[in-house]
Amino acid sequence: MLDIFKKLLVCAATALVIAVPSLAQASDFTLKGKTVTWIVGFREGGGTDRLTRVLQTKLSKHLPGNPKVIVLNKPGGGSVTASNDFHKNARPDGTMLIMASTSTLLPVLLGSNVARYNPNEWVAITGFARGASMYAISKELGLGGKDMKADYKALQSANIRFGTETPLSAELLDFVSLEMLGVKARYLFGLSSKDAEAAFQRGEMNVNTDNTRSYLKDYGKDPKVNPVWSYGVIDESGTLKRDPDLPNVPTFPEFYEAVKGAKPDGLAYELQKSLMNAKVMLSKAVMLPKGTPDNIREVYIKALKAVTSEPDVVAALPREIGSMPLNFGDDTQRALASGTKMDPAVRGWAKKFLKERFNTDLE
């Protein structure tokens, strides 16, 4: 399905040449007596915040000098506010990190002027892929979960209510998916992912989207809530496979083909695939500021490899990211480059869609 993903990775690999420091250089670096501030562009309690705090508990142990590590939440604009500030002001001395997310990458992918930063200039340390699914209160929408054509018919006539932060949030993937299917929904903006989930639990919203593990934890045994489709995972050959944590749930392309009688294609689908890359394959990424020296980069890569091997973290990660593999350093940097590029024609379709549906400009 996604040959473009493989091609972009190859192109990015030729464009990104990062020098590897000597062990002596890395050993000269210490953070003794210092404080490392880890920026999260969302409120406390959301998926990005939870994952950061899981890692934070062990990071000091594996950094030279065992510095104090604190998490600083700076919500606003789906992480854009924090990212703009980080890009402009973060010191490249190893004392500042940011946990980038899909919402960090989307404005860059779409060419929006609200993003006064380029995450490709940041220094990638660790990347986390996370499965994602769109789920619904089944009875209210008339979904049976067994017949995709019947579910599609129900969605077309349902009063769908969907809460999210902004039109440029990670949920843009879901907006485009519904648009491709010709399914209308009422969108309520201004809700963080945590607030949108709370509204869904209260029944104020009847459709929501989240990472697969959170869905399974909250609703895996709830017969009233069921996934409509998942967004799958791209394997090493560039082929879209079903989410390993939701093997019985169709991917969006499977759902589309079943109800439309043809495989998805066109500019909207190219956008949908790019958004899927950003939301699933590049769900979270630990980044250092632009200009960070290679020896500090190497120290952090080594530290995050050690952190993600800690038994407590190993036990916690499946609850946050599911069965997806991790990537580090150059692999993360290449994935980041591929996930922030888009054909101008596709970006033009996105610009028109956002303006017509949400009166939102990219400029």
Image: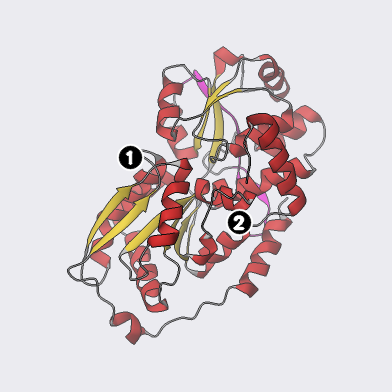
Please name the residue shown 21% across and 65% down the image. Answer: 67
- In the figure, residue 339 lies in which quadrant? bottom right
Residue 268, placed above or below residue 19? above
Residue 165 on the magenta span: no
Amino acid, disc 1: Glu
State the image coordinates of residue 80 (x, y, percent, origin top left): 47, 48
Separation (CA) of disc 1 from disc 2: 26 Å
Q: Is residue 66 left or right of residue 247?
A: left
Number of residues whose C-alpha sits closer than 10 Å to that of mark 2, classed few (under 14), some (14–19) or many (20 or more): many
Please name the residue shown 71% across and 53% down the image. Answer: 2
> Considering only order in the chain, which callout, 2 or 1, is on the residue closer to the N terminus?
1
Report the number of numbered marks. Answer: 2
Disc 2: which residue: 340
Query: Regarding mark 1 in the picture, which secondary structure is present there?
Result: loop
Which one is nearer the viewer's eye here, 136 or 313?
136
Q: In the image, which residues are magenta?
A: 222-242
Which one is nearer the viewer's eye here, 76 or 270?
76
